[in-house]
Image (cartoon, helix red, strand yellow):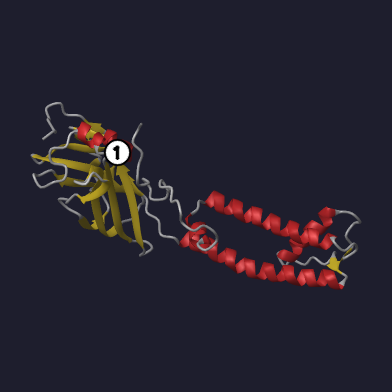
Amino acid sequence: MPQRRAFGRHGAGDLIIRKGLERGWHDAYHWLLATSWPRFIGLLVVGYAIANLVFAIGYTLEPGAIANAHQGSFGDIFFFSVHTLATIGYGNMYPQTLYANVLVALEATVGVLALPLVTGLVFAKFARPTARVLFSDRAILGTRDGQLSFFLRMANGRRNQIVEAHARLSVVRRETTQEGEAIRRIYDLPLVRSETGVFVFTWIITHPITPSSPLFGATPSSLDADQAEFVVSIVGIDETTSQTIHARWSYLPEEVVWGGRFVDVLTDLDDGRRQIDYARFHDVISDPRESPQP
C-alpha cells in the first residue's frame, strides 16, 4: 500500500479524517473563509436562489397578493422576490394585501441583514494574507560543502520580498515504543540557516546529517519502513501588505533524490541585475561520484 501524506502540501487540504468531532454551523465562518472561491460563490448563488424560491412560494399562498403579477405566473412572483430581497423596488409590482406586506417586510429584513454579512465574508476572503512560495518538487540527500546533508530549495513566487522569514524543517516517522505502541514522532531537523532578513532570491534549506541528526544512518529502505515524511514550513512578513504569511510543503521518501544537487538558476546580467530562471527551478543534477548514504 503506497504511503499517504499526513500533512497537506499547501496547508489547505484536509488529509486527516476527524471522527467524533461535533459538526454543524458552529464554525461556519471559519469554514467559509477556508473554502475555495468557486465553492464559496456557488454556495452564495444556491443560497440566494433558495431564499427567493422560499419567499416566492410564500407569496403564492395568497392569490392576488402581488399587484400586476400575471395570474398563475410563478416567474413574476419569483422575480418580485428577487427585487424585494435585493431592495431594488422597480415599482411595477407591489404587495397589496396585509399578508403580502408582512412577508415583504420580513424578506427586506433578511436582505438588509444578508448584504453586510456576505460583503464582510467576501472582504475577509480577499484580505486573507496568502503566500506564493515555490518549493522544489524533490528534496536531495547529498553532499554539500563536504558534509552529508538533506536540502531543498525555496523561492518567493511574487515580485516582492518576504522580510524576517523563518524556516523550519521536521521529519515525521512511525516508531514503536518499548511497550509495543505504534506512534508517530516529529523530530526537528536543525538548519545551517533557519532565518533571513530578506527573502528575495532562492533559498536552499540545508540540514547537515551529523551523528546527532535524526537522519544519521538513514537509508531509502529505512525511510520507507518508517513511513517518513519531511515537512518544511516558512513564516514571514509580506513586504507589500505588512501581513504575516506562511507556507508549507512536504516530501515523501520517493521524492528524495539520493545524491546530486540543484541546477543553478541565478544569473548575473550585464546591466548589474540578477535573473532567476524559474523554468529550471526544479531541475536536479545527479552526481554518480557521490555516495550519500552514511
Could you say which quadrant of the image residue 277 lies in? top left
Q: Quadrant of the N terminus?
A: top left
Decide if residue 175 is on the left or right side of residue 119: left
The percent coordinates of residue 40 (x first, y second) are 56, 54
Residue at coordinates 51% horizontally, 62% vertically from top-left?
Answer: 29
Decide if residue 264 is on the left or right side of residue 6: left
Residue furthest to the top in view is 288
The percent coordinates of residue 288 (x first, y second) are 15, 26
| Tag 1 secondary structure | loop
Query: How many C-alpha atoms fall within 10 Å of the one at disc 1: few (<14), some, or many (≥20)?
Result: many
The percent coordinates of residue 172 (x first, y second) are 26, 46
Decide if residue 86 is on the left or right side of residue 43: right
Could you say which quadrant of the image residue 117 lies in? bottom right
In the image, 23 versus 212, the foreground residue is 23
Residue furthest to the front in view is 179
The percent coordinates of residue 55 (x first, y second) are 76, 61
In the image, 110 versus 219, the foreground residue is 219
On screen, residue 196 above or below 204: below
Could you say which quadrant of the image residue 222 lies in? top left
Q: Is residue 268 visible from the viewing direction of this image?
A: no
Residue at coordinates 15% horizontally, 50% vertically from top-left?
Answer: 192
Numbered marks: total = 1
On screen, residue 202 above or below 196: above
Q: Is residue 193 visible from the viewing direction of this image?
A: yes
Task: Name which residue type carries label 1.
Answer: Leu
In the image, 209 versus 241, the foreground residue is 209
Q: Quadrant of the C terminus?
A: top left
In the image, 23 versus 249, the foreground residue is 23
Residue at coordinates 65% horizontally, 56% vertically from top-left?
Answer: 47
Q: Which residue is mark 1?
A: 252
